[in-house]
Image: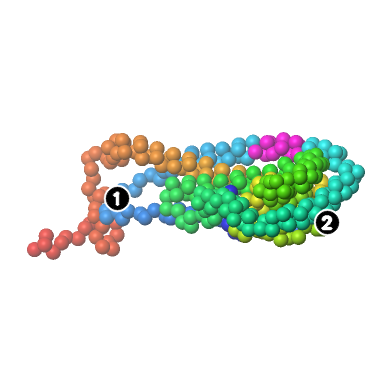
C-alpha cells in the first residue's frame, strides 16, 4: 500500500489543465482527484570559472534530435493509450449494459428483504456470542489486532507514509522519486480499477454475499459452545464487515457500532465516496473482505459506474500515464548521460585536435586579468617590470 500525500493545484507547465469533459448523467459532489506532490527540479550545475579569454565556438545542441524524438515518442504513446482506452470503454459499456439487464427490480427487492433478515439474525447471533465469550473484545484486541498491525507496520517500513523526498540532486535521485511516484499512481489506479470491477455484475456478487452470510450465521450458531475461537473471528472479521459493505446506503443496521469498533491503529482512511462506493485507500480489515458492491436501486447503477469512470478512473489512468512518461524520460536522460561519460572520455584527444587550429594563435588565448575585457593584453606584473 502507499499513502500518497495530496497537493493542489494539479496544473503545472508539465501537467497542463485537462480538457473539460461533459457533465456525467448523475449529480455528484466529487472533488478533483488529487495529483499528489509536484515533481522536484534538479538544481542548476555550478559552472566552472574560465580564467582565460577563449575563441568563440559554434553553438551546438547535441541533444536536440533526442528531444525531438522524445516528443514524437510521447505522441505515439498518447495515441496508443487513447486507442486502448477506447477499447476499454467499449468493454465497460457492454458489461454495464449486461449488469443493468441482470439487476432487476425484483432482485433488488429480494436483496433488501434478505439483507434485513440477515441483519436481524446477526444481531441475535452477537447476543449469544458475547454471552458465551464475554471477553470477546479483549480477545480481538489481544489476538487479532496485533496481526493486522504487523501487516500495517511492514507496509509502513517498506513504503513509508507516502511522503517523498523533498529535493533531488541528480538524475539518479529524480529517477528514484519518479519511481516512487509512479508506484503510488499505479496503486491508486489499480484500487479504482478493482472497485470498478466489483460493479461488473453486482447482482451476482450481492446474491453470493447474502447467501454466504446466511450460511455463516447458521454455521456459527452451531459452534458457539464448541469452537468460540472460530466464531469470534468469523463474526467480527468476516460476517459483520461483509454485511455492512453491501448495506443499502439508506438502510439502518441493528448492529451496535461497538461490534466493529476495535483495532484503533487500523482505522479507515477518510472516505472518498462521492460516487457512492468508497474509493479511498482501504485499511487492513477492508482488504481482508475485498471490494464489494452494495445494494442499490438498479436505476442508479449506470450513474454509479459512469461517475467512477469519469471522476476517478480516467483521472487516475491519466496520472499513471504521465508518471510513467516522466520516469521513462528521466531514464532516457540517464542513459544519454552515461553514454556521454562512456564515449567522451575516449575522444578527448581527438576532440581537442579537431577544435584547435595549427599553428596556435596565442592572441586568441589570453588570461583574464581582474575586470579587463577579454581580448585586452594581460598586464605585466611588478616583478616582471622591475
Q: In terms of depth relative to the viewer, which is nearer, 84 or 259?
A: 259
The x and y percentages for residue 367 are: 24, 55
2 or 1: tag closer to the N-terminus = 1
Q: Mark 2 points at which residue?
A: 251
Q: Name the residue under label 1.
A: 54
87 inside magenta stretch:
yes
The x and y percentages for residue 349 are: 27, 37
| Horizontal relation, residue 254 to residue 279: left or right | right
The x and y percentages for residue 374 are: 29, 56
Q: In terms of depth relative to the viewer, which is nearer, 351 or 220?
A: 220
Q: Residue at x 11, y 60 (%)?
A: 384
Q: Which mark is residue 62?
A: none
Taking the view exactly as shown, the residue that stands out farthest to the left is 386
Q: In this view, does 33 lie above or below 64?
A: below
250 inside magenta stretch:
no
Q: In which quarter of the image is the C terminus?
A: bottom left
| Horizontal relation, residue 340 to residue 209: left or right | left
Q: In this view, does 202 lie above or below 275?
A: above
Q: What stretch is highlighted in magenta?
A: 81-92
Amino acid at each position: 500500500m502507499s499513502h500518497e500525500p495530496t497537493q493542489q493545484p494539479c496544473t503545472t507547465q508539465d501537467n497542463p489543465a485537462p480538457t473539460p469533459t461533459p457533465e456525467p448523467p448523475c449529480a455528484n459532489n466529487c472533488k478533483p482527484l488529487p495529483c499528489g506532490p509536484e515533481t522536484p527540479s534538479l538544481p542548476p550545475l555550478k559552472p566552472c570559472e574560465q580564467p582565460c579569454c577563449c575563441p568563440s565556438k559554434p553553438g551546438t545542441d547535441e541533444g536536440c534530435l533526442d528531444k525531438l524524438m522524445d516528443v514524437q515518442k510521447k505522441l505515439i504513446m498518447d495515441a496508443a493509450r487513447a486507442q486502448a482506452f477506447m477499447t476499454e470503454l467499449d468493454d465497460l459499456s457492454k458489461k454495464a449494459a449486461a449488469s443493468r439487464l441482470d439487476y432487476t427490480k425484483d432482485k433488488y427487492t429480494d436483496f433488501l428483504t434478505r439483507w434485513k433478515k440477515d441483519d436481524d439474525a446477526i444481531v441475535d447471533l452477537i447476543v449469544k456470542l458475547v454471552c458465551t465469550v464475554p471477553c470477546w473484545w479483549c480477545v480481538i484486541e489481544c489476538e487479532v489486532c496485533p496481526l493486522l498491525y504487523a501487516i500495517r507496520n511492514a507496509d509502513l517500513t517498506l513504503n513509508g507514509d507516502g511522503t517523498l523526498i523533498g529535493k533531488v540532486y541528480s538524475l539518479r535521485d529524480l529517477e528514484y522519486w519518479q519511481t516512487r511516484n509512479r508506484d503510488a499512481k499505479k496503486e491508486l489506479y489499480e484500487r479504482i480499477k478493482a472497485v470498478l470491477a466489483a460493479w461488473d455484475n453486482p447482482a451476482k456478487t450481492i446474491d453470493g454475499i447474502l447467501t454466504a452470510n446466511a450460511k455463516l450465521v447458521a454455521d456459527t450458531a452451531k459452534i458457539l459452545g464448541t469452537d468460540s475461537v472460530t466464531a469470534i473471528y468469523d463474526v467480527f472479521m468476516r460476517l459483520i464487515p461483509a454485511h455492512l459493505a453491501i448495506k443499502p446506503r439508506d438502510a439502518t443496521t441493528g448492529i451496535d457500532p461497538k461490534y466493529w469498533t476495535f483495532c484503533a491503529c487500523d482505522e479507515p482512511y477518510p472516505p472518498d465516496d462521492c460516487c457512492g462506493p468508497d474509493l479511498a485507500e482501504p485499511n487492513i480489515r477492508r482488504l481482508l473482505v475485498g471490494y464489494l458492491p452494495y445494494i442499490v436501486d438498479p436505476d442508479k447503477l449506470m450513474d454509479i459506474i459512469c461517475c467512477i469512470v469519469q471522476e476517478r478512473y480516467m483521472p487516475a489512468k491519466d496520472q499513471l500515464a504521465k508518471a510513467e512518461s516522466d520516469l521513462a524520460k528521466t531514464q532516457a536522460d540517464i542513459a544519454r548521460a552515461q553514454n556521454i561519460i562512456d564515449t567522451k572520455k575516449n575522444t578527448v584527444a581527438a576532440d581537442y585536435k579537431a577544435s584547435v587550429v595549427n599553428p596556435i594563435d596565442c592572441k586568441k588565448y589570453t588570461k583574464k586579468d581582474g575586470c579587463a575585457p577579454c581580448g585586452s593584453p594581460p598586464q605585466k606584473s611588478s616583478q616582471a617590470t622591475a
